[in-house]
């Protein structure tokens, strides 16, 4: 038997091309295990009889005879002919051979058929090929590998001393004439170097087993990869942010890529060139860079903008305000100077008041929507002294609307009306003017002002570094069937460059249209490293690579990489493998631009940032009269998460974060988690709409009666990824139930009924009171399913000075009549209902409060 094994059988195709020669290709065993379908290599040459078919082999069942042979010839040239062979019985589980013969010779041996090739006149098969099996039906036939002699290895020799002794013992056997054992000898030096390398490799092997499990891992990179498998985002700390306010006597243009700010350093000016800092100690100051890439324009005179009080004194903006009026003439930005094509009359002056505004002069205010202003108390309200100003009375707001103002009593005074985001509403009353102490009793004005020329900065300095080139690992050349080279592939080495400087800056990316109050707040677990890579291939093709938190969502052609920080604080870059992210091509060189500086060291106090540093080009403008300060403290700097805490919290964190909404409570919890600054409460209910189930989610927005369509659409889009399959999703605003309440109040003698009633109407209103308290029926004071208790109404009314007694005469739903609410002491509400009582005579359908007073005067 010829045991020749070839990977590429060229003879098979050669036999197929011959017209005078044929062969057997393969056969299929029928379900009855007696019918064999044998396929030829091309067309059947001759007719075959049962005597021409011989079945050999078998261990238990032998001497199988062929009863019938039927040759089928196909007319289609691309299909091979086949024959059907029927045997008298089925074989066992051993391997049989079907052979085509041409009778016996004189010695009684079977003769080879002249029309069939000697290599393809037989085919091996098994009668049990269709029997169920857990093994792959394909049999790999490979040439047996060459057997190599393996040296004897002492696996107990794992340290430096053992390796050194093992090498010396080996050298004593192969080099008996070398007997030197002194340390200065070159041979001993080489032996110790090899022992050291073996010891290091042994340690690495042990470390691999140690880093394979979360409990035993010691490297920060290993622990980060372990906890990522359970969706635990281990953080590497975060940098600090703050606002820098610049006072200048002339307009300045700053390139944010060419400047940065530093904390106070003695002996240098307000504006300094970077090379002048080389003589300073780097640890003596902290660096803050602008968080924008656009050219920064600073305008003269906008460091101090006065508020307009319309001629009144002792004025203040109450807590929760979102608008004010400034002194000065608003200068429209260039992009909005032209009228909108759909509104040609947008900037056309049509009335005398508009003409007065256009012709008036005053301090120019270069403001636009999206700018940030800082409200600051600069003198004490009672003393008028700057030292008595409250440093806590500082608040940044992001402008949403700017309009020209006009005072008909003083037409020469230019005014600008500003409005800011609701999330930036004043957290405290802002005083503008107040009366000083006696005996002078003078009016202290401009107690608080607005400051523009604000720059959002964060901790860290940008450095540039050229990384090593991606090296070749191997070159693979593939051959075709004819022996030629078809493809040449260069496989690069594993590329994980190390950044030289540390600590790498981490920070949360700033989203567009973020309110000012949230610009300084960062989620440390969403912070990303500040690294950008530029790759240049050997063909001078430039590509930009972006940093990601991980590569699990990357495609094979995405130019992305991941930053992993090790125990020593240095960052290592990891690229994709052409499946999850693209692998860098061999020969590619990278240039890294990254920032250094992170953690609590950036949490500097207010009034500590006072210098502007430029790298190459000075700012365009007069820089002699310039003042730099940070009105607010820098905050947000956080240390990297300790490994002990990661090991403690990561295995259980996935149980605490809800990632699937199954029950109605799950939907409500996810809404509150995803929209903490927009939604006060949420409730959900599963209902049958007649055809299928749908989950109705009702939301109670913050600081408003009903949620707008944009918020509802955003919530529905966010919930869609969590919803249960088979449930439709509907998000609506909460159902407000208008109430009808009547109170009978008995006023104590000596109290004016009007004063008592005014106080009661304030306490039971839906407004925010001047002192910051919320009215009883304020939207943020009530939530889903919260019934109105009669005792609580009595308690609120009884707390008003001058009230002797309280009686509730009516407590019911508006236009629905009583339902024993007073008898039960509560007006119940459904799980998706919220009480409402606006007490607005213009909209009586939104709730009514009747207060009847007796007694008093």
Image (spheres, rainbow, N blue to C red):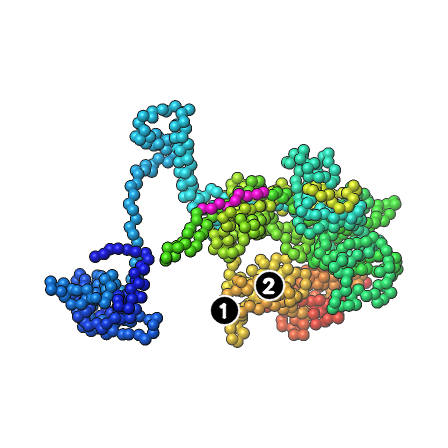
Q: Which residue is mark 1?
A: 726
Q: Nearer the viewer, residue 424 or 629?
A: 629
| Magenta highlight on residue 752 | no
* Quadrant (top left, top right, bottom left, bottom right) of the C terminus: bottom right
The image shows residue 163, relative to residue 395, as above or below, that is above
What label does residue 849 carry, if any? none
* Label whose residue precedes the other's in the sequence (2 or 1): 2
Q: Nearer the viewer, residue 604 or 381?
A: 604
Q: Which residue is mark 2?
A: 715
The image shows residue 476, relative to residue 737, as above or below, that is above
Residue sitting at 74 percent across and 52 percent down?
373
Residue sitting at 39 percent across and 23 percent down?
182
The image shows residue 560, relative to residue 79, as above or below, that is above
Q: Nearer the viewer, residue 232 or 470?
A: 470
Q: Nearer the viewer, residue 368 or 394?
A: 368
Measure the C-alpha gap from mark 2 to mark 1.
Answer: 19 Å
Q: Using the rendered image of the protein, determine whether residue 816 is visible from the camera's viewpoint.
A: yes
Q: Secondary structure at mark 1?
A: loop
Q: Residues within 10 Å of mark 2 (few under 14, many from 20)?
A: many
Q: Using the rendered image of the protein, determine whether residue 637 is visible from the camera's viewpoint.
A: no
Residue 710 vs residue 346: left or right?
Answer: left
| Magenta highlight on residue 468 | yes
Residue sitting at 55 percent across and 68 percent down?
729
The image shows residue 775, relative to residue 160, as above or below, that is below
Q: Position of residue 575 (x, y in %)?
A: 51, 50
For the record, the magenta segment spans 465-473
Residue sitting at 79 percent across and 56 percent down?
331
Q: Residue furthest left?
A: 107
Residue 58 vs residue 637: left or right?
Answer: left
Q: Position of residue 262 (x, y in %)?
A: 68, 41
How many numbered badges does the structure rendering display?
2
């Amino acid at each position: 038997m010829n045991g020749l094994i070839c990977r590429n059988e060229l003879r098979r195709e050669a036999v197929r091309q011959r017209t005078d020669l044929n062969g057997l290709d393969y056969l299929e065993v029928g379900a009855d295990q007696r019918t064999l379908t044998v396929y030829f290599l091309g067309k059947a040459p001759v007719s075959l009889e049962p005597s021409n078919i011989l079945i050999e082999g078998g261990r238990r069942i032998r001497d199988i005879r062929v009863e019938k042979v039927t040759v089928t010839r196909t007319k289609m040239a691309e299909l091979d002919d086949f024959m059907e062979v029927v045997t008298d019985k089925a074989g066992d589980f051993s391997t049989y051979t079907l052979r085509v013969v041409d009778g016996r010779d004189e010695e009684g041996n079977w003769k080879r058929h002249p029309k069939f090739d000697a290599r393809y006149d037989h085919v091996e098969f098994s009668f049990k090929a269709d029997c169920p099996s857990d093994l792959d039906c394909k049999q790999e036939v490979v040439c047996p590998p060459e057997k190599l002699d393996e040296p004897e290895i002492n696996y107990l020799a794992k340290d430096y001393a053992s390796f050194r002794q093992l090498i010396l013992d080996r050298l004593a056997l192969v080099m008996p004439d070398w007997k030197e054992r002194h340390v200065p000898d070159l041979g001993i030096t080489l032996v110790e170097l090899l022992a050291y390398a073996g010891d290091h490799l042994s340690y690495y092997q042990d470390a691999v087993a140690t880093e394979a499990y979360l409990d035993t891992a010691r490297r920060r990179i290993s622990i980060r990869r372990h906890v990522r498998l359970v969706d635990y985002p281990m953080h590497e700390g975060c940098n600090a942010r703050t606002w820098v306010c610049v006072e200048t006597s002339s307009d300045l243009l700053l390139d944010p890529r060419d400047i940065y700010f530093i904390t106070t350093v003695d002996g240098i000016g307000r504006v300094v060139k970077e090379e002048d800092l080389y003589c300073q100690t780097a640890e003596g100051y902290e660096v803050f860079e602008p968080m924008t890439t656009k050219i920064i324009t600073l305008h003269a005179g906008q460091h101090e903008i006065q508020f307009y009080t319309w001629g009144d004194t002792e004025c203040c903006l109450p807590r929760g305000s979102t608008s004010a009026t400034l002194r000065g003439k608003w200068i429209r930005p260039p992009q909005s100077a032209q009228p909108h094509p759909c509104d040609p009359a947008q900037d056309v002056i049509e009335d005398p008041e508009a003409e007065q505004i256009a012709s008036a002069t005053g301090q120019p205010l270069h403001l636009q929507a999206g700018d940030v202003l800082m409200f600051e108390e600069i003198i004490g309200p009672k003393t008028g002294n700057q030292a008595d100003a409250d440093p806590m009375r500082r608040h940044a707001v992001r402008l949403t609307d700017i309009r020209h103002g006009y005072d008909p009593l003083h037409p020469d005074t230019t005014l600008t009306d500003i409005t800011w985001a609701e999330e930036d509403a004043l957290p405290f009353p802002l005083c503008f003017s107040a009366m000083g102490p006696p005996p002078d009793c003078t009016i202290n004005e401009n107690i608080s002002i607005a400051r523009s020329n604000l720059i959002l900065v964060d901790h860290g300095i940008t450095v540039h570094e050229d990384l090593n080139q991606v090296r070749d690992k191997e070159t693979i050349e593939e051959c075709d069937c004819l022996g030629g080279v078809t493809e040449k592939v260069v496989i690069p080495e594993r590329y994980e460059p190390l950044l030289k400087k540390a600590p790498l800056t981490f920070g949360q990316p700033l989203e567009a249209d973020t309110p000012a109050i949230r610009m300084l707040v960062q989620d440390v677990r969403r912070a990303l490293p500040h690294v950008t890579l530029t790759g240049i291939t050997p063909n001078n093709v430039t590509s930009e690579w972006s940093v990601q938190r991980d590569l699990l969502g990357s495609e094979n052609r995405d130019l992305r990489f991941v930053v992993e920080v090790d125990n020593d604080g240095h960052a290592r870059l990891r690229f994709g493998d052409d499946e999850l992210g693209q692998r860098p091509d061999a020969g590619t060189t990278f240039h890294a631009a990254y920032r250094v500086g992170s953690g609590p060291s950036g949490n500097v106090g207010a009034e500590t940032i006072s210098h502007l540093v430029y790298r190459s080009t000075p700012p365009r403008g007069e820089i002699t009269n310039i003042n730099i300060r940070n009105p607010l403290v820098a905050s947000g700097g956080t240390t990297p998460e300790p490994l002990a805490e990661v090991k403690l919290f990561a295995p259980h964190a996935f149980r605490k974060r809800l990632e699937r909404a199954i029950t109605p409570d799950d939907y409500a919890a996810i809404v509150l988690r995803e929209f903490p600054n927009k939604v006060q409460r949420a409730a959900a209910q599963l209902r049958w709409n007649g055809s299928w189930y749908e989950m109705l989610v009702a939301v109670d927005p913050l600081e408003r009666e009903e949620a707008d369509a944009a918020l509802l659409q955003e919530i529905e889009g966010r919930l869609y990824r969590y919803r249960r399959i088979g449930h439709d999703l509907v998000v609506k605003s909460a159902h407000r139930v208008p109430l009808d309440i009547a109170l009978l109040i008995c006023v104590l003698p000596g109290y004016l009924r009007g004063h008592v009633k005014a106080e009661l109407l304030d306490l039971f209103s839906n407004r925010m009171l001047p002192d910051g308290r919320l009215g009883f029926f304020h939207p943020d004071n009530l939530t889903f399913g919260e019934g109105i208790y009669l005792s609580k109404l009595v308690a609120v009314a009884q707390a008003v000075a001058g009230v002797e007694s309280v009686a509730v005469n009516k407590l019911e739903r508006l236009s629905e009549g009583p339902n024993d609410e007073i008898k039960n002491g509560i007006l119940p509400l459904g799980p998706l209902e919220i009480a409402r009582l606006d007490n607005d005579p213009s909209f009586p359908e939104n709730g009514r409060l009747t207060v009847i007073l007796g007694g008093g005067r």
